[in-house]
Image: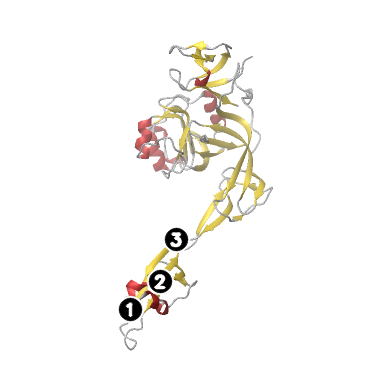
Amino acid sequence: MAHSYTPGLKVTEYTTMRYRRILPIKGKVLVKEGDTVKADQVVAEAMLPGDIEPVNLANLLSMPPADVAECVVKKEGERIEVGELLARTKGIFGFFGTEVKAKVAGTVETVSHITGQLMIRGAALPVQVKAYVSGQVIEIIADEGCIVEAQASFIQGIFGIGGETVGPIRMACSRPDEPLDEEHISDDLSGAVVVGGGRVTAGAIAKAVKAGVAALVSGGIDDQDLRDFLGYDLGVAITGSEQLGITLVMTEGFGDIAMAGRTFELLKRREGCEASVNGATQIRAGVMRPEVTIPITGKLERSGEAAVDATTGLGVGLPVRLIRHPYFGKLGTVSGMPSEPHVLDSGSKARVLEVEFKDGTKAIVPRANVEIIEG
């Protein structure tokens, strides 16, 4: 049987997920190997030095920079509060002296004899890394973080925006092809990971942000709705750093596309469970997919669906998604793998495969036009 490898999206009910939770700078790890952690638990913390606020005392006191130091009433390293006296000139016979008071709180760091400037260092800024998923710490990386492992259901999407968030899964649509509009969003969905079906509308996104929804997961989105929500054209760079009050994950793509039935049913079976969602996406070198991770905390009844091993390559019987016109977004199963190149409508030759869709129809498509739906 012929085989060829093609990357695909992973949708699986049982898998082992491992996440490296690392600080951007050296800090303190707050957990131990073997600890059980919750998704929102801080596992490592560091303190970033505060911002520097320069104060030009030479100008404010109208004196040469070399004379500034003797007018400063605070020593280097001392704490100073807003409105507290920072420097004072001697004046005439102790009168008519000029005073400078601090406009920001912080610590006096340095006084320059060359520029006449005093530097106030603001309060240190805490940088925290959370576990992201509920699981077990299996490894400690000294002064940097840890690795968290969880048995989980796992779903990759095509595209997303927004960073990491956590919440219980709530089904908003009853069918995988049902559009997710603003009528499906209510205030009781605050903090939840809301699952739709087909296209999510701009109205639904706006209402979800207002209601405090943690994340929206649906089949597709119109590119104009996305542009209006972001306020700019996204381009092809990495996403995930947007601060828009919500995380979005599209499981199928752009347009009026229904969520894959297999994905929808998996999310439906896990309704009420805690899900960790990350919308970060990168579609150039170093591909990064948005994801939904649902830790398994107890016994989960299997759906009876056979697992699919996609690591060995593309072969007959594997579920695939078509990623090119005219079948973009459609799901099917590989039913044939012709070994000889096939002449396409364009006149060019390419290796192809036969895909059978759920309605029994079949199509011959280039192998490059499909991706495996991993199990």
Which amino acid lies under the numbered mark 2 shown in the image of this protein? Answer: Ile
Q: Which residue is mark 2?
A: 114
At label 1, the amino acid type is Thr
* Cα–Cα span, label 2 and label 3: 22 Å
Can residue 362 be seen here? no
Give the mark, 2 or 3, whose residue is nearer the N terminus: 3
Q: Residue at x 33, y 72 (%)?
A: 59
| Residue 114 placement (x, y as % from top left) | 40, 71
Of residues 216 and 108, the one nearer the viewer is 108
Q: Is residue 271 above or below residue 177?
A: below
Vertical side of 227 occupied by 359: above or below:
above
Of labels 2 and 3, the one closer to you: 2
Nearest to viewer (mark 2 / mark 1)? 2
Disc 3 designates what residue? 51
Give 29 or 338, whichever is nearer the viewer.
338
Q: Is residue 93 above or below residue 297?
A: below
Q: How crowded is the residue under tag 1: few (<14 C-alpha within 10 Å), some, or many (20+)?
A: some
- Closest to the observer, 245 or 96: 96
63 to the left or right of 248 = left
Where is residue 315? Give x, y as percent: 61, 18
Q: Is residue 246 visible?
A: yes
Q: Secondary structure at mark 1?
A: loop
The reply to whether the C-beta atoms of the residues labelled 2 and 3 are less than 8 Å apart is no
Report the residue marked by disc 1. Answer: 98
Which amino acid does the dot numbered 3 rest on?
Answer: Asp
